Amino acid sequence: IKITSLCLVNYSEKDFYPISSLVLLEDLKVKTALINNCLGIEKLTKLKSILLSNCKKLSSLNGLGILKNVTSLSFDLCP
């Protein structure tokens, strides 16, 4: 399956390892999540756009700095 866009609502994982096999993703939206960190997202090297919204437990952005194709990065209601 070639998934290039994904919107996760009420995502209950602590990081992005559960979706790290979706290597063709270009657009990721996460709305209301329990993530603590961004680990696993570094595997999604084709990502161009990331929106993290209402991720109130987010305490680390580790993994984001490796992504070289990201042109849009947005945070809404994240600490």
Image: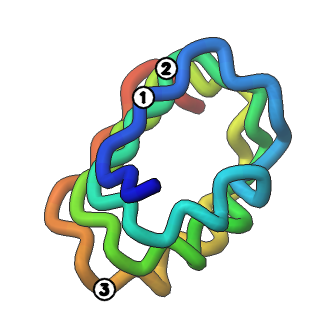
Distance, label 2 to label 1, CA atoms, is 7 Å
Q: Tell me the SS state at disc 1.
A: strand
For marks 1 and 3, give the one nearer the viewer: 1
Q: Is residue 15 left or right of residue 4?
A: right
**For this rendering, which residue is in front, 79 or 36?**
36
Q: Which residue is mark 1?
A: 7
Q: Nearer the viewer, residue 2 or 28?
A: 2
Answer with mark 2 or mark 1, whichever residue precedes in sequence. Answer: 1
Residue at 59% x, 31% y: name it: 79
Residue 53 bears which disc, if any? Answer: none
Instruction: Please state which amino acid type lies under the numbered disc 1.
Output: Cys
Whichever of labels 1 and 3 marks the residue nearer the N terminus, that label is: 1
Q: Position of residue 51 (x, y in %)?
A: 35, 38
**Residue located 31% across and 86% down the image:** 68
Residue identified by numbered label 3: 68
Q: How many marks?
A: 3
